[in-house]
Image (tube, rainbow, N blue to C red):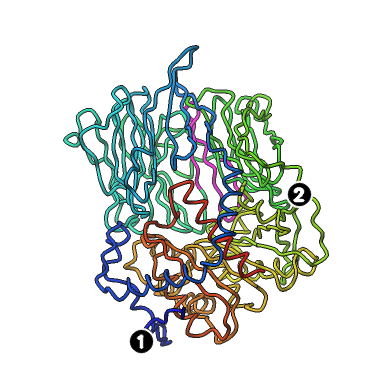
Amino acid sequence: MKAPVSKKIPLEITQHGVTRIDNYAWLRDENWKNICDGDIDFKNPEILEYLNAENAYTQHMMSDTWEIREQLEAEFRSRLNEDKETYPFRRKDYLYYERYKKGLEYSIDCRRLDKEGAVEEIYFDRNVEASGRELYRLINEAVSPDNTFFAYAFNLSGSMNATLRIRDLRTKTDLAWEIPDTTGDILWLNDTNLLYVDREHDARGQRIYSINVVEGPSSRRLIFTKPEDYTDRFMWLQHTQDKQFIVVLLNSGSSKTLFVSSTAQLNFSHFVSGTNDELFRLEHVNGSFYILTSDASSINGRVMRTSSEPAHWGRESWQEYIPQASEHFLRNISAFNDFLILGGRNNHQAVPVLLVHSINDKTTREVDLPEADCLFHILGSDDHRDLNPMVYLESAILPESRLQLNLPSATLRIIHTDKIPNFSPENYIVKKEFVTARDGEKIPLTIIHRRNFRTDGSAKALVYGYGSYGLAFMPRFKPHIFSLLDRGYCYCVAQVRGGSDKGHSWYLNGKMLNKKNTFFDFIDCCEFLIQQGYAHKDYLAIEGASAGGLLVAAATNCRPDLFRAVLAHVPFVDAINTISDDTLPLTPPEWEEWGNPIKSAEDFHYMMSYSPYENIQKTRYPAMLFDSGISDEQVTYWEPAKMVAKLREYKTDNNLLLLNMRMTSGHAGTSKRYEKLKETAFDYGFLLKVMS
């Protein structure tokens, strides 16, 4: 079967005196917004014909992998706890948890009174809600303070659009109304009143409404409208831990603004604004605000304090409470009882940091984590006076765990770890190397392999990367990777600049006009693996998703000779065209991450020098699999479609090039747990096929 060949319709684009021809811009359909919402009705049927042809070609070329894919899927399933119950979370007198049943795609939400002999209540069965649907994604959920109502926001296409519904937990039935076109952001004010954010056409959130769920839509009241100066920003709702204040966060790349109101009054006022990547996180304890912030003079973050009275909200009233430290970068703050919990990163070792600060005696202690290289976040407690809030934690070889954080002693105790069948952590080794980059920086590289692995240069390797938006990309527990490790692979995560793996400066040195550091770091890590015998020079594969898809595509354009295979998931590969199009709803907030090529000639030329689609060459490329979702609103379907079409025109080899366009999903892929195993088996089937 021959590979599809897209027709070419030249589109001339001129920016800053430079003219380029885009032959595949026609793949963007005029009805793309409806397609994102699940209405797969192309105005130009030729686009759908082309995508179907690519999918048919992909299935044909992968037909010889059925056996290995079934084997992989069986292996993945053997490490899946199919009948599983999550550790319960207390909400007043109730314990809430999720159950999974063998053979069912979705979890079942349950609760029971915390007393002996209490009967389990199933209050939300996602399998029932998803019945007859190809996709069902619960975007957000929240139980009312008195445990009477369950608010949930869901999506059926894979886009970011959410419909809000309310379930009465006494009758287990939904109220007779719903609110479409929300962002999914919800927050309970009290037992019957709820705040939600409407979506509007730009998908960034425009207004906040309150609604009395008993009275229904007739009670809807406008609470806050995003000021005109901030229309390009995303909007989120947050509570302080004690629920006394509500924070509206307006965020756009490096600019952040907070509006604050007491929960009782619902009268929002400006609290603080900052640019140049200033950080703001707000908590409230006993009449004082504690603000975790960073600026040019405190890049590692410090905690400021001021009165919660509006007259003292201005920065001139802030007093330094916890100064910045040189060894770590603080990113998150929460408050329980008279303690502050601070989370961040060690700037030198590239591992997480958890600190507990006592407001009473002004001491700060670092908490020993059960694994140095781990991912954690504070789950907290329903009671802001709790001295033992819950913590979520996992690592590359430690499954999802629940821990209690004892605040007075600053110690953690594991209270639950998921049981993973057919998995023995002692069979594997996790190590962190620091790779010397071409400019002298030390790049953290986490390497996972079997204990009997030999660094003699004979092995195959899969390297994952991301490196954007300041996200520290810690190795998570991914049961499927052990199928590769057991076949002699090593699996690696390159913690390149653009994330915050080594602090805030690590992020700043991998964004905007420093973005190429992300790609060069990744390439240098891959070369290190070959030099140190972790990987054979002919058997190196790379993987990335979203902005990580841009990373692996840009790295491949730079060094197509270095890689044997590329897995690019929902890849942001048409960067210059997307970031130059301010009619796309998600573009304006991205300018402070990537640059604004519309206004700035410098930004334009820099982005043009690495944008993957624009830098495809007439040369040999490795085997490449691009997969995406037709309803992806964050990285639209035409980005990988255009990339594949142009690669087919330019590449000079016969290596496999596939586009796997999933016609019933968005950015996050399938919502079904067994279907997700099939998707991963497909990707790994491709990998094993081309790496043989």
Q: Nearer the viewer, residue 553 or 376?
A: 553
Identified at 44% across, 63% down, the residue is 628
Identified at 50% across, 54% down, the residue is 678
Q: Nearer the viewer, residue 290 or 439?
A: 439
Q: In this figure, which residue is indicated by the disc labeled 2?
A: 429
Q: Position of residue 120 (x, y in %)?
A: 43, 21
Dot 1 crowding, Cα within 10 Å, few <14, some 14–19, many 20+: few
- In the structure shown, which secondary structural element does the residue marked by tag 2 occupy? strand
Q: Nearer the viewer, residue 205 or 102?
A: 102
The answer to which image quadrant residue 186 occupies is top left
Q: Is residue 300 magenta?
A: yes
Judged left or right of residue 237, residue 425 is: right
Which segment did they paint magenta?
280-303
Q: Name which residue type carries label 1.
A: Pro
Q: Is residue 249 above or below residue 552?
A: above
Q: Name which residue type carries label 2.
A: Ile
Judged left or right of residue 278, residue 519 is: right
Q: Which mark is residue 10?
A: 1
